[in-house]
Amino acid sequence: MHIIDLIIFVVVVLGIVVFGASFYQKNRSSDDFSTGSGKIPAWLLALSIFATYLSSISYLALPGIAFATHWNSFTLSLTIPFALLIAVKFFVPLYRKAGSTSAYAYMEERFGVWARMYVAGCYLLTQIMRTATILYLLALPLYVLLGWDLKWIIVLTGLGVLIFSNLGGIKAVVWTDAFATIIMLGGALFALGYLIFALPGGISQYFEIGIAHNKFSLGSFGSSLTEQTFWVVFIYGLFINMQNYGIDQNYVQRYIIAKNDKEAVKSLVGGALLYLPASLIFFMIGAGLFAFFHVYPDLLPQMYRESGMSDRVFPFFIVNIMPVGLTGLLVAAIIIAGMSTVSTSLNSGSTVFLIDFYKRIKKSVSENESKRVLYIFSFMIILLGILISFLFIRVESALDLWWKLSGIFSGGMLGLLLLGYFSKKATNMAAAIGVILGLTVIFWMSLSPLLFTGSLVAFKSPFHSYLTIVFGTMTIFFSGFLVTLAISRFSKRTRK
């Protein structure tokens, strides 16, 4: 790295770390760590929600998949306004009234302890997988830059994020998110501008090459449920975004800790809608990378054109082709994006473990013990994330794998929330039956393509893996509703 880039990189990253660590003295209690004591303004929470979306997954995986294929995955962003309407109407008022730092206290109130444990457990699994995905992507630019063993880079960055997160608590996370957002978006816009104007024909050539190679396509609009069509991604996006706003502690924790209901809505709407144009920028970068290396093919080594290497194209471009100054800024932006997002997962994940599991097992917990549990479980998430991220090293697309994993490990928990909220008469038994059936569908859709071979091949799931969360959620909701209806009718007949 050029000395100027190195200075910019060190100053920006070190500045963010020192800034986050400065909150350590203010982070005196577990309440400070988890909620910021209710003193965080709406605009800051909005930027934090936006930064939760805008992780290393967006920064590297979106350009990677747009470079390798097209804009079909952008369809997920188009579902945000629809999911947002549902969240503002139903979910925000629900959690604001619940009065708990955990998003899952409502599940216990509605269906009992088992429901809370189930949903909280699903959430922790998704956060471990999310941490693994981001740690892998976070290590890619450093790998291109330093040439070190990728596993060691993952370990070092994971431990660095752990220290940063535990020093500052939620205040450090949301303030860092705000600064990270500015740096990330600024760096992305610089990269897009450079890509376009480095082409001999400028922006017109950018669109000509993109159109000629179908780079701006949103995918097939056919009705097939076995392929990654526009409608499959749209349905997946609608459900995954409803899950984000409705039962994901990362997001729910943000509007729970807002000062009042009005600010909670402002923070959610502002943060969510910011992601729509931001994700468009990253897909434009992916198309720009394709156009740039189409015009200058000798600048991209053959290894980066192979399957499984698309996530590394943007880091290669940043380190080897971007002008002096911008390289340091963009590498810093990616590192900060990963730090802030993993910190969010560590903070919310450890909060869920403390409130939903530890304090239920041990009724009397001192303040020092609470903080110690938060720190220890943060370390456990990082450790598991590091180990799992090693498995990502040869995947074709980290984004595609993350979407599949999030659909599986979320366990249809959105379905249980929808059942509890919209079916007021749904009983614990009906909910439990719904969950069992929903998990059966999820396991069938996830495992049957791998396990059902030979004579069993006719019984494997024919549906696209993105639909796992959709069918799992709907199975829980509708089966729980129908069982409730059947129990109600049976009770009436018995009374007669």
Image (cartoon, rainbow, N blue to C red):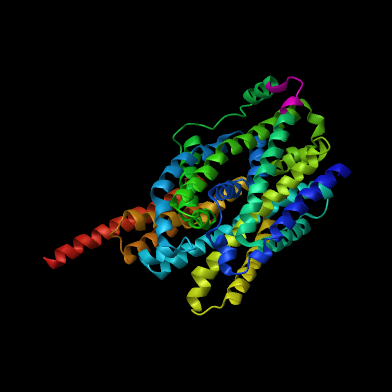
Queried whether the magenta region covers residue 197, the answer comes back as: yes
The answer to which of 292 and 21 lies nearer the viewer is: 21
Res 309 → quadrant? top right
Report x, y in % for residue 444: 47, 55
The answer to which of 492 and 219 lies nearer the viewer is: 492
Residue 5, compared with residue 24, is above or below; it is above
Residue 455 in sight in this render: no
Report x, y in % for residue 377: 61, 68
Question: As drawn, is 109 to the left or to the right of 448?
Answer: left
The answer to which of 296 and 227 lies nearer the viewer is: 296
Residue 254 in sight in this render: yes
Q: Residue at x 64, y 67 (%)?
A: 380
Q: Residue at x 81, y 50 (%)?
A: 10
Q: Residue at x 55, y 66 (%)?
A: 31
Residue 154, compared with residue 59, is above or below; it is below
Quarter of the image for the C terminus: give it: bottom left
Q: Count up the numbered dots.
A: 0
Res 186 → quadrant? top right
Question: As drawn, is 403 to the left or to the right of 425?
Answer: right
Question: As drawn, is 34 to the left or to the right of 394?
Answer: left
The answer to which of 119 and 10 lies nearer the viewer is: 10
Queried whether the magenta region covers residue 345, the answer comes back as: no
Report x, y in % for residue 82: 44, 40
> Residue reaching furthest left?
496
Q: Which residues are magenta?
A: 196-203
Residue 294, compared with residue 247, is above or below; it is above
Quarter of the image for the N terminus: give it: top right
Report x, y in % for residue 40: 56, 55
